[in-house]
Image (cartoon, rainbow, N blue to C red):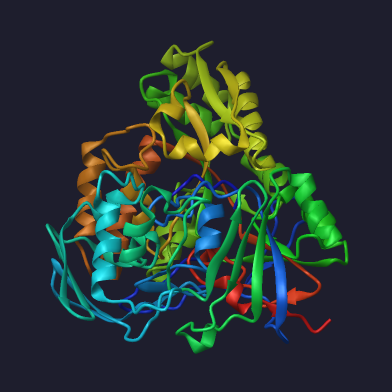
Amino acid sequence: MRTPRFIAFVCTAAVAASLTACSGATQPRPGTGGGADYTVSPTSPAAEGPLDSFTWSLYAEPYTLDYALAYDYPPNTVLANVCEQLLRVTPDLRIEPGLAVKWARPDPRTLVYTLRPGVKFHDGTTMTADDVVASLKRQMDPATGSPWGSAFKTVDAIEKTGPLEVTIRLGKADALFHELLAASPGTVVSAASLAKEGKDYGTPEGRLNCTGPFSLEKWAQGDSITLKKNADYWDEKLVPKSESVKFTFIEDAAARANAFLSGTADGGYLVPSSSFAQLRTSGKGSLLFGPNTAAADLAVTNFKGTLGDLRVRRALSMALDRKNIVKAAAGGVGVPAKAPAARGAWSLVPEKTAALHDTLPEPAYDVPGAKKLIEEAGATGRKVTIATSSLAPEISVVANAVQAAGRQIGLDVKLQPVSPDAYSNLFVDPAARDGLDLVVTNGYDNTPDPLEFYQYLRTGDFGNYGNWSNAEYDLAFDRANTEYDPAKRTELTADVQEIALRELPVIPVYEAPYSVFLGKRITGAPTGIAQLYYPWAATIGASRS
């Protein structure tokens, strides 16, 4: 549920051990009454030639380029091209070898990774097991303050067991840990550079020394980030087609759309839904939709207030007009969410998705019934505060819809404005959530395993923003996470999902595909959420036109 990012969560990566194909990666999807038909495909047409450079629009400036602290779309979108993981998520949402060429599980509590030989960091030094050990251990160090620290909760030891071999020993079986090494937890950087940069690492004053197809050339704070081609990149299939990439930061949705239309930005992910219609008919490029594992949800951040009563949470869910929210917040491109984890997050065993997710009932829309629940709870007139922000139109649309729903059933819903640069902070700093009862989130998986989303609702987890605690839930989660057979684990995850739907620590709102705009002069970009870890910029080149 890594949720700082709000804007888009319909398929996800396949489990590493089996390399299961992603189900339904390319398919037409009907709109929800808004007349917005769309097709989901993992890639755009292949590049026809090289480019000197292209400009890419981010909706906000990254708050860090430290892999251990990157927990939001802007930093991960940049870092995906600079730093790499032991495993790699592909555009069609599989997991394949990355900086590790193979791995083994000799027993349920031991993982052994064989590293790719001859991989060079950007400074020309060679990657070794020492770099992997230092990179992973840094995530576990409380002094780092990594939001990914909880991914290592079962890790007892990370050891170099050969020049190109790393062994990880677990305190108990943990099915998710291996999968997450395809995301930020598995990032490998130069141990020497970590020591050299110190407190400047990941800041505009520091340098990065990774293994990706691009290296960091310049971070002009408040203006842009420039990457340059790594001429010595190890993967011949992903040698960059462009000599450089310039990232610009445009927070205002209308200004961002204008940048696409004017050509001052060649492209960008997470396109503002308010500009979908304009961009589709502009003739200035292509608006494409890709696989997503995300759902827009309402995370309850205060269980000691009005929403501590389950009847109030259920009532608020019942009062949400999700179909109209999809029209207003997602341009009609999406569907009401049936559960906190999106359908796309159920791709671990695709043949079970229909039975375990699709058979769930549509979320109820029953204002009179919701009002009755509020009255039964004695909550009429009680206050609920939800964060809103101009960071993305979708946030304010959902927040306003929650306020309207609350008024219909007798709740006093207050909107608390949060500046764009502070919105992500709500998800990494508990103090920033003081006084809030709800935040609009974009909860998504980094893997194809729906259990990954539900780990963030365990007692004490970093992503459990309201400190919700339920012993039955924790037990069901642990039962699923100690089952290594994917089919059996998926069945057990359905039990976890059932508890989450019954207790509503997170209220599902809607699902939408990932979005990307490509100006007429470029093509080749992956279109889906895999871009957060796949070196997507390497495949972008000149279009035929």
Image coordinates of residue 54 in percent, x first then y, are 71, 69
Rendered location of residue 236, percent (x, y): 50, 89
Residue 349 seen in render = yes
* 284 or 78, nearer to the observer: 78
Q: Residue at x 66, y 42 (%)?
A: 392
Residue 232, relative to residue 152: is it above or below?
Answer: below
Q: Residue furthest front?
A: 196
The image quarter containing residue 46 is bottom right
On-image quarter of the C terminus? bottom right
**Residue 157 occupies quadrant:** bottom left
Answer left or right for 66 relative to 328: left
| Relative horizontal placement of residue 410, taking residue 497 as reference (left or right) | right
x, y (%) of residue 399? 61, 31
529 vs 230, nearest the viewer:
230
In the image as oriented, which residue stretches furthest toward the bottom? 236
117 over 161 or under it: above or below: below
Which x, y percent locates residue 268? 68, 60
- Compared with 90, 429 (above or below) is above
Q: Residue at x 42, y 16 (%)?
A: 377
